[in-house]
Amino acid sequence: MVDKTGVAGAADTDAAAGADADAKSGRRSGGKAGAKSDAKAGAKAGAATPRERYRAQVRAEIKEHAWKQIAEAGASALSLNAIAKQMGVSGPALYRYFAGRDELITELIRDAYRSLADAVHAAAVTGADPAGLAHVLRDWALADPHRYFLIYGTPVPGYHAPDEITGISSEIMADLLTACAALEPDAPATPFAAHLAGHRDWAGDHPAPPAALHRAITFWTRLHGVLSLELAGHFTGMAFDPALLYEAEIDDLRAPRG
Protein backbone atom coordinates (compact mmCIF):
# COMPACT_ATOMS: atom_id res chain seq x y z
CA MET A 1 0.00 0.00 0.00
CA VAL A 2 0.96 3.68 -0.22
CA ASP A 3 2.44 4.83 3.05
CA LYS A 4 1.48 8.21 4.50
CA THR A 5 4.87 9.73 3.67
CA GLY A 6 4.29 9.20 -0.03
CA VAL A 7 7.45 7.07 -0.34
CA ALA A 8 7.10 3.95 -2.47
CA GLY A 9 7.94 0.98 -0.34
CA ALA A 10 7.68 -1.78 -2.93
CA ALA A 11 7.36 -2.45 -6.64
CA ASP A 12 3.60 -2.85 -6.40
CA THR A 13 2.94 0.60 -4.89
CA ASP A 14 1.05 1.96 -7.90
CA ALA A 15 -1.11 -1.13 -8.12
CA ALA A 16 -1.92 -0.96 -4.43
CA ALA A 17 -2.75 2.73 -4.62
CA GLY A 18 -4.94 2.03 -7.61
CA ALA A 19 -6.74 -0.74 -5.80
CA ASP A 20 -7.34 1.59 -2.86
CA ALA A 21 -8.68 4.26 -5.21
CA ASP A 22 -10.83 1.73 -7.02
CA ALA A 23 -12.36 0.63 -3.73
CA LYS A 24 -13.37 4.22 -3.11
CA SER A 25 -14.85 4.62 -6.57
CA GLY A 26 -18.15 3.19 -5.43
CA ARG A 27 -18.64 6.36 -3.41
CA ARG A 28 -18.25 8.54 -6.50
CA SER A 29 -21.23 10.26 -8.07
CA GLY A 30 -20.21 9.65 -11.68
CA GLY A 31 -17.72 12.48 -12.25
CA LYS A 32 -16.82 14.19 -15.52
CA ALA A 33 -16.62 12.50 -18.88
CA GLY A 34 -13.05 13.75 -19.23
CA ALA A 35 -12.05 12.29 -15.87
CA LYS A 36 -13.03 8.85 -17.12
CA SER A 37 -10.65 8.90 -20.07
CA ASP A 38 -7.72 7.36 -18.21
CA ALA A 39 -9.85 4.56 -16.80
CA LYS A 40 -11.31 3.85 -20.24
CA ALA A 41 -7.85 3.84 -21.77
CA GLY A 42 -6.67 1.31 -19.23
CA ALA A 43 -9.68 -0.96 -19.72
CA LYS A 44 -9.61 -0.67 -23.51
CA ALA A 45 -6.14 -2.14 -23.87
CA GLY A 46 -6.53 -5.89 -23.61
CA ALA A 47 -2.85 -6.31 -22.80
CA ALA A 48 -2.89 -3.72 -20.02
CA THR A 49 -1.28 -4.95 -16.84
CA PRO A 50 -2.99 -4.68 -13.45
CA ARG A 51 -0.61 -1.86 -12.58
CA GLU A 52 -1.57 0.05 -15.75
CA ARG A 53 -5.26 -0.39 -15.03
CA TYR A 54 -4.85 0.75 -11.43
CA ARG A 55 -2.80 3.72 -12.54
CA ALA A 56 -5.52 4.74 -14.99
CA GLN A 57 -8.15 4.40 -12.26
CA VAL A 58 -6.17 6.55 -9.83
CA ARG A 59 -5.58 9.25 -12.45
CA ALA A 60 -9.29 9.26 -13.23
CA GLU A 61 -10.16 9.67 -9.56
CA ILE A 62 -7.63 12.48 -9.16
CA LYS A 63 -9.26 14.31 -12.06
CA GLU A 64 -12.73 13.85 -10.57
CA HIS A 65 -11.56 15.47 -7.34
CA ALA A 66 -9.88 18.23 -9.36
CA TRP A 67 -13.15 19.05 -11.15
CA LYS A 68 -14.91 19.27 -7.79
CA GLN A 69 -12.25 21.68 -6.53
CA ILE A 70 -12.61 23.81 -9.65
CA ALA A 71 -16.38 23.90 -9.21
CA GLU A 72 -16.01 25.04 -5.60
CA ALA A 73 -13.08 27.46 -5.76
CA GLY A 74 -11.88 27.87 -9.35
CA ALA A 75 -8.90 26.44 -11.22
CA SER A 76 -6.43 28.84 -9.60
CA ALA A 77 -7.11 27.16 -6.23
CA LEU A 78 -6.42 23.65 -7.51
CA SER A 79 -4.26 21.75 -5.01
CA LEU A 80 -2.77 18.27 -5.31
CA ASN A 81 -2.25 18.19 -1.55
CA ALA A 82 -5.94 18.86 -0.96
CA ILE A 83 -6.86 16.12 -3.43
CA ALA A 84 -4.48 13.72 -1.70
CA LYS A 85 -6.15 14.45 1.63
CA GLN A 86 -9.57 13.73 0.15
CA MET A 87 -8.28 10.44 -1.25
CA GLY A 88 -6.64 9.46 2.03
CA VAL A 89 -3.04 9.43 0.76
CA SER A 90 -0.05 11.75 1.12
CA GLY A 91 0.62 14.64 -1.21
CA PRO A 92 3.85 13.11 -2.57
CA ALA A 93 1.93 9.94 -3.45
CA LEU A 94 -0.07 11.83 -6.08
CA TYR A 95 3.06 13.13 -7.76
CA ARG A 96 3.60 9.66 -9.19
CA TYR A 97 0.47 10.25 -11.28
CA PHE A 98 0.80 13.96 -12.08
CA ALA A 99 4.12 15.77 -11.84
CA GLY A 100 2.44 18.88 -10.48
CA ARG A 101 -0.53 21.21 -10.62
CA ASP A 102 0.23 22.38 -14.16
CA GLU A 103 0.31 18.84 -15.54
CA LEU A 104 -3.04 18.14 -13.93
CA ILE A 105 -4.53 21.35 -15.35
CA THR A 106 -3.17 20.46 -18.79
CA GLU A 107 -4.87 17.07 -18.58
CA LEU A 108 -8.19 18.66 -17.61
CA ILE A 109 -7.93 21.23 -20.40
CA ARG A 110 -7.02 18.52 -22.90
CA ASP A 111 -10.05 16.48 -21.85
CA ALA A 112 -12.31 19.52 -22.15
CA TYR A 113 -11.06 20.59 -25.58
CA ARG A 114 -11.15 17.01 -26.84
CA SER A 115 -14.75 16.65 -25.68
CA LEU A 116 -15.84 19.86 -27.44
CA ALA A 117 -13.82 19.17 -30.59
CA ASP A 118 -15.36 15.71 -30.90
CA ALA A 119 -18.89 17.08 -30.37
CA VAL A 120 -18.40 19.83 -32.97
CA HIS A 121 -16.81 17.48 -35.48
CA ALA A 122 -19.57 14.90 -35.08
CA ALA A 123 -22.06 17.61 -36.08
CA ALA A 124 -19.84 18.96 -38.85
CA VAL A 125 -19.49 15.63 -40.64
CA THR A 126 -23.27 15.38 -40.85
CA GLY A 127 -23.34 18.70 -42.71
CA ALA A 128 -24.20 21.06 -39.85
CA ASP A 129 -24.05 24.74 -40.83
CA PRO A 130 -22.61 27.43 -38.52
CA ALA A 131 -25.95 27.65 -36.70
CA GLY A 132 -25.88 23.91 -36.01
CA LEU A 133 -22.34 24.15 -34.67
CA ALA A 134 -23.38 27.10 -32.52
CA HIS A 135 -26.09 24.98 -30.90
CA VAL A 136 -23.55 22.23 -30.22
CA LEU A 137 -21.32 24.77 -28.50
CA ARG A 138 -24.11 26.07 -26.26
CA ASP A 139 -25.34 22.60 -25.34
CA TRP A 140 -21.80 21.56 -24.45
CA ALA A 141 -21.22 24.69 -22.36
CA LEU A 142 -24.51 24.42 -20.45
CA ALA A 143 -23.85 20.77 -19.68
CA ASP A 144 -20.80 21.74 -17.62
CA PRO A 145 -20.12 25.47 -17.10
CA HIS A 146 -16.96 24.84 -15.04
CA ARG A 147 -15.46 22.85 -17.89
CA TYR A 148 -16.38 25.68 -20.27
CA PHE A 149 -14.77 28.34 -18.09
CA LEU A 150 -11.59 26.30 -17.66
CA ILE A 151 -10.86 26.67 -21.38
CA TYR A 152 -12.68 29.92 -22.24
CA GLY A 153 -12.65 31.82 -18.95
CA THR A 154 -9.98 33.78 -17.12
CA PRO A 155 -6.53 32.21 -17.62
CA VAL A 156 -5.08 30.39 -14.62
CA PRO A 157 -2.30 32.60 -13.15
CA GLY A 158 1.15 31.23 -13.90
CA TYR A 159 -0.10 28.47 -16.19
CA HIS A 160 0.89 28.14 -19.86
CA ALA A 161 -0.77 25.49 -22.01
CA PRO A 162 1.48 23.37 -24.26
CA ASP A 163 1.25 23.62 -28.04
CA GLU A 164 -0.70 20.37 -28.32
CA ILE A 165 -3.65 22.04 -26.60
CA THR A 166 -3.69 24.75 -29.25
CA GLY A 167 -3.78 22.01 -31.86
CA ILE A 168 -6.97 20.53 -30.43
CA SER A 169 -8.67 23.94 -30.24
CA SER A 170 -7.70 24.52 -33.89
CA GLU A 171 -9.78 21.49 -34.88
CA ILE A 172 -12.89 23.27 -33.62
CA MET A 173 -12.12 26.41 -35.60
CA ALA A 174 -11.38 24.35 -38.72
CA ASP A 175 -14.87 22.82 -38.63
CA LEU A 176 -16.41 26.28 -38.16
CA LEU A 177 -14.36 27.69 -41.06
CA THR A 178 -15.52 24.88 -43.33
CA ALA A 179 -19.15 25.53 -42.40
CA CYS A 180 -18.77 29.27 -42.95
CA ALA A 181 -17.06 28.81 -46.31
CA ALA A 182 -20.00 26.68 -47.48
CA LEU A 183 -22.54 29.26 -46.33
CA GLU A 184 -21.52 31.96 -48.79
CA PRO A 185 -18.72 30.80 -51.08
CA ASP A 186 -18.88 33.97 -53.21
CA ALA A 187 -19.60 36.56 -50.51
CA PRO A 188 -17.93 39.94 -51.00
CA ALA A 189 -14.99 40.63 -48.70
CA THR A 190 -15.49 43.24 -45.97
CA PRO A 191 -12.64 45.61 -45.00
CA PHE A 192 -11.94 43.43 -41.97
CA ALA A 193 -12.02 40.29 -44.11
CA ALA A 194 -9.43 41.88 -46.38
CA HIS A 195 -7.29 42.48 -43.29
CA LEU A 196 -7.72 38.86 -42.21
CA ALA A 197 -6.49 37.68 -45.61
CA GLY A 198 -3.03 38.78 -44.50
CA HIS A 199 -3.45 37.93 -40.83
CA ARG A 200 -4.73 34.38 -40.86
CA ASP A 201 -2.24 32.44 -38.76
CA TRP A 202 -5.08 31.66 -36.35
CA ALA A 203 -6.80 29.73 -39.17
CA GLY A 204 -3.83 27.45 -39.78
CA ASP A 205 -3.67 26.08 -43.30
CA HIS A 206 -7.44 26.13 -43.85
CA PRO A 207 -8.23 27.42 -47.38
CA ALA A 208 -11.29 29.44 -46.31
CA PRO A 209 -11.68 32.69 -48.29
CA PRO A 210 -11.51 36.06 -46.48
CA ALA A 211 -15.31 36.37 -46.16
CA ALA A 212 -15.46 32.99 -44.40
CA LEU A 213 -12.63 34.03 -42.09
CA HIS A 214 -14.59 37.11 -41.10
CA ARG A 215 -17.81 35.21 -40.54
CA ALA A 216 -16.12 32.45 -38.52
CA ILE A 217 -14.26 34.76 -36.18
CA THR A 218 -17.37 36.89 -35.70
CA PHE A 219 -19.41 33.80 -34.86
CA TRP A 220 -16.78 32.68 -32.40
CA THR A 221 -16.36 35.97 -30.56
CA ARG A 222 -20.00 37.02 -30.36
CA LEU A 223 -21.36 33.63 -29.34
CA HIS A 224 -18.70 33.16 -26.70
CA GLY A 225 -19.56 36.61 -25.42
CA VAL A 226 -23.21 35.68 -24.94
CA LEU A 227 -22.34 32.29 -23.44
CA SER A 228 -19.80 33.72 -21.01
CA LEU A 229 -22.27 36.31 -19.73
CA GLU A 230 -25.04 33.73 -19.42
CA LEU A 231 -22.95 31.14 -17.60
CA ALA A 232 -21.49 33.72 -15.25
CA GLY A 233 -25.02 34.71 -14.23
CA HIS A 234 -24.96 38.24 -15.63
CA PHE A 235 -28.40 37.82 -17.20
CA THR A 236 -29.97 36.79 -13.90
CA GLY A 237 -32.76 39.17 -13.01
CA MET A 238 -32.92 40.75 -16.47
CA ALA A 239 -36.20 38.95 -17.24
CA PHE A 240 -35.39 37.60 -20.69
CA ASP A 241 -34.55 34.18 -22.05
CA PRO A 242 -30.80 33.85 -22.82
CA ALA A 243 -31.58 31.02 -25.23
CA LEU A 244 -33.62 33.42 -27.37
CA LEU A 245 -30.83 36.00 -27.27
CA TYR A 246 -28.36 33.35 -28.41
CA GLU A 247 -30.73 32.34 -31.21
CA ALA A 248 -31.13 35.95 -32.29
CA GLU A 249 -27.35 36.31 -32.46
CA ILE A 250 -27.14 33.21 -34.64
CA ASP A 251 -29.81 34.55 -37.01
CA ASP A 252 -27.99 37.85 -37.29
CA LEU A 253 -24.60 36.22 -37.82
CA ARG A 254 -25.74 33.95 -40.62
CA ALA A 255 -27.55 36.72 -42.52
CA PRO A 256 -26.05 37.44 -45.97
CA ARG A 257 -23.32 40.07 -46.04
CA GLY A 258 -22.80 42.82 -48.54
Image: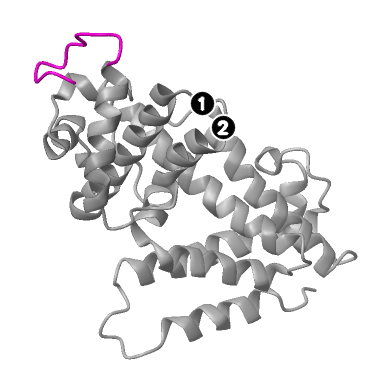
Location of the C terminus by quadrant is bottom right
Q: Residues within 10 Å of mark 1 (few under 14, many from 20)?
A: few
Residue displayed at 32% across by 91% down = 239
Which residue was labeled with disc 2? 45
- Looking at the image, residue 217 sits to the left or right of residue 6; the answer is right
Q: Which three-letter amino acid code belongs to the residue tagged 1?
A: Ala
Q: Which three-letter amino acid code belongs to the residue tagged 2?
A: Ala
Pinpoint residue 49: horizontal percent, then vertical percent.
46, 23
- Relative to 79, is 93 above or below? above
- Looking at the image, residue 90 sits to the left or right of residue 94; the answer is left
Q: Is residue 158 visible?
A: no
- Relative to 251, is 182 above or below? above
Which structural element holds mark 2? loop
Pinpoint residue 231: horizontal percent, then vertical percent.
35, 68
| Residue projecting furthest to the bottom | 239
Between residue 169 and residue 213, name the one nearer to us: 169
Which structural element holds mark 1? loop
For the image, the number of numbered tags is: 2
Location of the N terminus by quadrant is top left
Which residue was labeled with disc 1? 48
| Residue projecting furthest to the top | 10
Q: Identify the magenta region.
A: 1-12
**Contact, mark 2 vs mark 1 (Cβ under 8 Å):** yes
- Relative to 79, is 219 above or below? below
Pinpoint residue 118: horizontal percent, then vertical percent.
61, 52
**Residue 9 is one of the magenta-drawn residues:** yes
